[in-house]
Amino acid sequence: MGLALALCGSSCSDVLDLYPGDRFSPATVWSTTTTVDNYVLGLYSIIGVNSEIYGDAAPKLSDAYSDILKCGDWDLYGTNFNKTLFQASAFDSNSAGAFECWESHYGRIRRENEFLRDAPAYKEKFGEEWINTRIAEVRFCRAYAYYLLCRVYGGVILRTEVDGPEENDKARSSEEECWNFIITELQQLAPMLPVGNKGTSENWDDANYGRITQQAAYGFLSRVALYAERWDVAADAARKVAECGADLDWSGYANVFNGDIQNNKEILLAVDFQRDVITHRYDMYVRPSGDGKALGYSTSSIYAPTNELVDSYEMADGTEFSWDKHGDNPYEGREPRFYATILYNGASWMGRTIQSYVGGDDGYKDYENAGASNTTVTGYYLRKYLQDGDKGWTTAYSDQTWIIIRYAEVLLNKAEALAQLSWEQNSTEALQALNDVRRRVGLPARQTADKETFMEYLRHERMVELAGEGFRYWDLRRWRLAEEVINGKNVHGMKITKQGDDSFLYEEVDADAGNKRIFYERYYRFAIPESERSKNKLCTNNEGWV
């Protein structure tokens, strides 16, 4: 319930009186537990509007900035993936371009700081424990805003109180200081929260499903600590998530995205969209173009998995996929995550068979730097989060719940942190965490005595386990591998041609139309907006941006 309402933000004016014009009257906010909670849930919108599934039109899906997802749109739907990847002019010394988020996040941080300033005065009225829980929720939202800022800009300005004119000029803190601030916040606020979302005395009740829990706070901490290279913190946070009752969904990988979200122990934090309340357009932009034809509705169908992703899924017995060995039936006998993530030529879907070959119902089109393809440019479609049999999106848009944090990510965070902390001491536990993720999908355990080999396994596992969920681009930046994987490279697709005997010819093609992708060293830390530097005399730009 919580995050769906939170997405309303300040637009839910029928709940709270506005004062004056665009502000809530303090007397109104602090009048009852209901009004306080509505305001707190409004601050949750930092999570909802920044989820990968949400967007002004097309969903954000940041994997399309990486090597595993290709956007077939140049400029028709306002997406900027290809311009960002192909044009050096996409970024300059005054803006982070497609990733610009400074003003919006600091606006939220100010509102959060105002709440944190005022809340302690109401402990007697509402009870200390009740207020402390709301304080912890808002501190989490503020930590989330700083996380989004730091992964784009590195060191930012830490404003932890309601600053006045005399605090206008303030220098940026170092990146290390910023990550450590977020870590300390999460360590302090986590114990103040209910443990989980399962309706017991130590958890949120069912009416408050979706609110921040200890599980979510520690899970998020395990992620943030990787950026800070605080390996011990990440590993310890991951252990605490397990102690709070989280687990993998052993009923199957696909069930995580299509099953009972509310009672799934793997899901630690999610944005619960609702039709007729707050929706998104994931189906319109992700579904196969043949779905639109079958239902008499126009789909944009611009997001497509690349060969770089598709060919990375192993066979069901754990052997590597090879076109030389498996090319006669390339989509048979693959591991479960392949079928839960990829829609391929010949897949059963919506009561029909996917035809992603040239001239098929789901089409194929060579990518061009003009307009939008409105069909696959790689021969594949993204399956994850789509609901087979659902037709409601044609009249009321989409309402899939988007998972922000799940336990499989936490296990992979733990595996990486333990290996980096001390491979010699932690190799057994690191391998166990990695292999638990593999065991859930029936793949054999990895074994190695070498840290570098383990990290190759870990990077592979994150790519296929978390594909389409918004980790790949940021992982490449965090690992300092973005130049190697993106710069000067192309991604590829599979152009499939149907033969007269109902067999298929598979031809690997350049899905970037010959364009070379760009990722310069300075892209690891984008430029601080000129608007901030002109107002704040002590704010300097990042290195590499004049």
Image: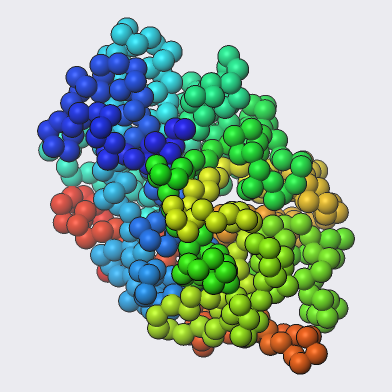
Residue that sits furthest to the bottom in the current view: 500
Q: Across the whole image, how many numbered discs are drawn on residues?
A: 0
What residue is rendered at 28% in x and 29% in y?
15
The residue lying toward the viewer, choosing from 287 and 523, is 287
Colour scheme: rainbow
Q: Residue furthest top?
A: 124
Would residue 241 be found to the left or right of residue 396 on screen? right
Q: Residue at x 55, y 83 (%)?
A: 365
Whether residue 81 appears in this view of the structure is yes
The quadrant where residue 245 appears: top right
Q: Is residue 304 left or right of residue 539?
A: right
Q: Position of residue 492 (x, y in %)?
A: 61, 79
Residue 203 versus residue 246 in the image, above or below: above
Residue 183 in percent (x, y) is at 48, 36
Q: Residue at x 44, y 32 (%)?
A: 2
The answer to whether residue 43 is above or below residue 524 is: above
| x and y percentages locating residue 446 in the rendered image | 82, 54
Indicate whether 109 appears above or below 516.
above
- In which image quadrant can residue 500 be found? bottom right
Q: Position of residue 233 (x, y in %)?
A: 58, 36
Between residue 397 and residue 454, name the one nearer to us: 397
Quadrant where the C terminus sits is bottom left
Q: Is residue 307 visible?
A: no
Residue at (44% x, 37% y) in the render:
3
